[in-house]
Image: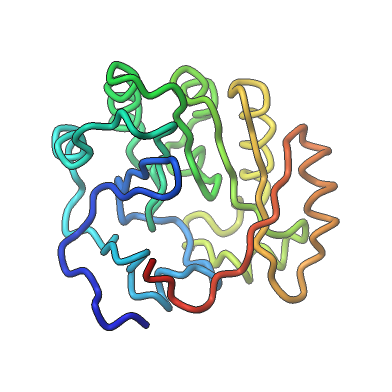
Amino acid sequence: MNTKESRTESLVYAYKNGLYVNLTSQCPTACTFCIKFSWKHQYRSHNLKLTHEPSVAEVLEAAGNVSCYQEVVFCGYGESTYRMTEMRELSDAFRQKGIGRVRLNTVGLGDLINKRHIAPELGSFLDSVCISLNTADPQQYIELHRPLPAFRDKAFESVQNFIRECVTHVPETVVTATDLPGVDIEAVQRMAASLGAQFRLRPYLDNYESM
């Protein structure tokens, strides 16, 4: 672990050509592979543990000049679909600043969180949705993602329905799987294809990355 951890919360952070928005600390899962636990909410010298839910104005102020970025990505250590209204407002604001692509990285339980189908709304302001599925086995899904009790029984079915709807409403839908021991990656890839989505394998992050 890097000993020079940031103590000031980061509402936004840069990675490659993207500006990442850290919109909430709320999450419907406690995934066994989530690096927020082993990395103590740090990411590349940014502290992503929020002390409050930031306003749209706070995020825009933190972002500053965004002309150097190719895309904005809603992705922190929380689940951004808890804040649908703020995502829409920020997407509109960033597009007005010249951002041409807006993406959401999500665990895919936004329908259960919001108690409604959200893909049509997401499709009205997003260009891409990346959904962390990680397994095609329902029992392994529970073991890996550890959904909160309110979501546990319906989580695996709900995320599949969410993927189907995103394929219909969002220009790009990508299912991801982390390269974990004991996971049948080919089965996840087949499930993604059966739902109409693209597939991407993600590396398992272990050692803390300070840079």
Question: Front-most of 27 and 58?
Answer: 58
Residue in the picture at 27% in, 83% down: 3
Would you place residue 136 above or below residue 72 in this image? Answer: below
Residue in the picture at 61% in, 36% down: 162
Image quarter where the N terminus lies is bottom left
How many labels, in total?
A: 0
Where residue 59 sits in the image (x, y, percent)?
Answer: 21, 39
- Left or right, 32 with respect to 39, comes to right
Residue in the picture at 62% in, 43% down: 158
Image quarter where the C terminus lies is bottom left
Would you place residue 54 above or below residue 38 in this image? Answer: above
- Left or right, 23 with respect to 194, comes to left
- Left or right, 24 with respect to 206, comes to left
Would you place residue 185 above or below residue 197 in this image? Answer: below
Where residue 120 sits in the image (x, y, percent)?
Answer: 53, 21
Question: Front-most of 105 and 157?
Answer: 105
